[in-house]
Amino acid sequence: MDTVKRLDRERWLAHQARWRRCVFFALTFLTAFAAGFLMFDILRANRLGPLELTGLITFIALFTWIAGAFWTAVAGFFVRAIGRDPAALHPQGDPERAIRGRTAIVLPIYNEDTQRVFAGLSAIWSSLEELPQARSFDFFVLSDTRRPEIAVREEQAWRSMVARYGASGRLFYRRRADNIGRKSGNLAEFVRNWGGAYEYMIVLDADSVMSGRALVTMAQTMDDHPEVGIVQALPLLAGRETLFARLLQFAVRLNGPLFAAGLTFWQLGEGNYWGHNAIIRMRAFAEHCSLPRLRGSPPFGGEIMSHDIVEAAFLRRAGYRTWLVPDITGSWEEIPTNVIDYAARDRRWAQGNLQHAGVMPMAGLHWLSRIHMLTGILSYATSPMWLLVLLVSSILTSIEAVAGHKYFVPGAHSLFPTWPQYRDGEIVVLLSMTCVILFLPKILGASLVMANRQLRAAYGGARRLIEGLLFEQLMSMLLAPTMMLFHTTFVLNALMGRSVGWDAQPRGDRGISWREGFMRHRWHLLLGLVWGAAILALAPKFIGWMLPVIIGMIFAVPFTVLTSRNSLGRELRARGLLLTPEETSPPPELAALEANLAEAELAGTEAEAPAQVSAVRVPQHAPLAMADEHEPVARTPRAA
């Protein structure tokens, strides 16, 4: 009977997927077409030359991009306003129900802050131990650390945690002799050597924190849905204090659930895997997710850097579904705390996403998996496109301002002049459309919070919420030109064959000095000054349109330096601005993390280190072979 019900639901889901995606893509392309037609009418009023045509094509592509985000937000708003999407996967977590299979919680690390890693792991352990299903979970710290002094601290912290919690036989540490395949190779080796002992694998990042209830709910959901290969929880941002980090925490906390609900509405079981805070069906992963080595050399060839989207695509090709489940609460991560580190992380992601151009043509992939990869590519490729549109519009305006309008076109053989035409009505409509598409999603997210008294209070009340929203929007506008230039540089570097390295992500509240800020933004500053001066000299009436972009470039250095100050972040928090529910009422897991960090700081690093660093501290082998359909990234031998 369960099989019949499951087949009926699969057919119903297929029907839901068809009409939802038809509506979503139709609205997206119709919106872009309408905007493109208005722009075409504006440009052709006087003359549609090669520059105008280039700007028009690029504009339509970019408007399609933002229109998709807009309709995703609208769908998410209605889902959250109604309260439940009948087609989405809704976990039935039961605090008493046993989990049928065992679950490995794996934490891949690479030259990380050891105190932060084990403080977070301790918070997760303590939360899980309060539940009766705790014995169904084992923890694995999978180290790829290359620096011996950090490796010593890792093993010391592992030993200390095992002794503190009596965790022998449930908390394991392994450091690889080499780091072939990076994070994906680290996980692949674990799956090959010890995956056979576990039904599921929950992947964490070095800065992840998850509640025990979330972990149990994810495992129970996999028990209930054998057709699911991955359940991705929504990680919210928390834990950082700089102004930059608190801006991002506020924005993601306010709008993240809205967009997640919208993505789930039209993606359904063809969602994405984000690489952490997710549970994976172990055997399916082993059989179908061995990664290919792309032809050619980096940055487009070689090992796949952004492996998570590819693994979700391979699982879907094998018939397993990937669900984003915003209903699973108790999932957090941290964010880079300044613009420089945030951009450095984006540089790695940019190369990884651009690599997917070599994965998209692979046979058998679901068409939506290809769309996900294309979306990842465009998330960075749109920056040089925006820059091109801005440059083209500046050039056209300057040419017209300098040369003036040509009343008699050569070769037209007309006795009457061609008078300049202006499409004021179309311009107003197009600007209004653009503003609605850019700003309405944030208003929708804020309105959902305003409608909930308890949630509204968690953001500091209605007035503080609105003030925070306006301030965050202003700061986002200042940041946008800088990130556009960073992303453009990353894309151009990749196209020129310059590959990025694999470094640990800075995770502390790192402040940026004025010297570092200037060195990283000097070309942005120079471009802003030259661009602004050229517009003022050639087409001063156009400066008002370009002012937001020019100001963002000129003030990039003070923006980066000042927003990296945690003193400013604390000051705004004391004034009730940019508050999030995790700050006004910290969950037990985040409170435990802070307490663990404070305890570690107090204890210092005076404890005696182990005499040597062990390469492997893992249980008896339980092999689970990875499929050989593609050449695996990692080919390391089993540990002794």
Image: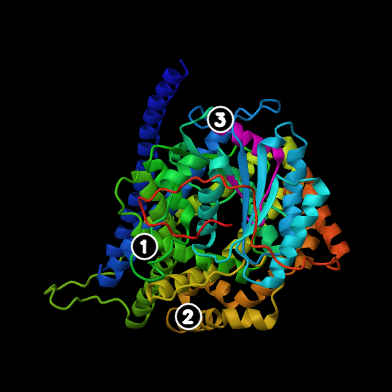
* Residue highlighted by disc 1: 294
Q: Percent x, y for residue 232?
A: 55, 43
Mark 3 vs 1, N-terminal side = 3
SS of the residue at dot 3?
helix
Q: Residues within 10 Å of mark 3 (few under 14, many from 20)?
A: some
Q: Residue furthest top?
A: 1
Q: Amino acid at mark 3?
A: Asp
Q: Amino acid at mark 2?
A: Trp
Rendering quarter of residue 557: bottom right
* Residue highlighted by disc 3: 223
Left or right: residue 623 compared with residue 374: right
Q: Amino acid at mark 1?
A: Leu
> Is residue 588 visible to the viewer in this orientation of the structure?
yes
Q: Percent x, y for residue 535?
A: 46, 79
Give the distance between the C-alpha atoms of the residues marked 3 and 2, in whole angstroms. Answer: 59 Å
Q: Percent x, y for residue 499?
A: 45, 73
Instruction: Tell me if label 3 and label 2 are in contact, CB under 8 Å.
Output: no
> Within the magenta stretch, is there residue 284?
no
Mark carried by residue 119: none
> Is residue 233 visible to the viewer in this orientation of the structure?
no
Left or right: residue 99 compared with residue 9: right
Left or right: residue 420 compared with residue 153: left
Mark 3 vs 2, N-terminal side = 3
Q: Residues within 10 Å of mark 1 (few under 14, many from 20)?
A: some
Give the distance between the C-alpha atoms of the residues marked 1 and 2, in whole angstroms. Answer: 40 Å
Count of numbered labels shown in the rendering: 3
**Foreground residue among 192 and 224:** 192
For the record, the magenta segment spans 202-222
Q: Quadrant of the C terminus?
A: bottom right
Q: Quadrant of the N terminus?
A: top left
User: In the image, what residue occupies the spot 56% across and 47% down?
Assistant: 194
* Residue highlighted by disc 2: 531
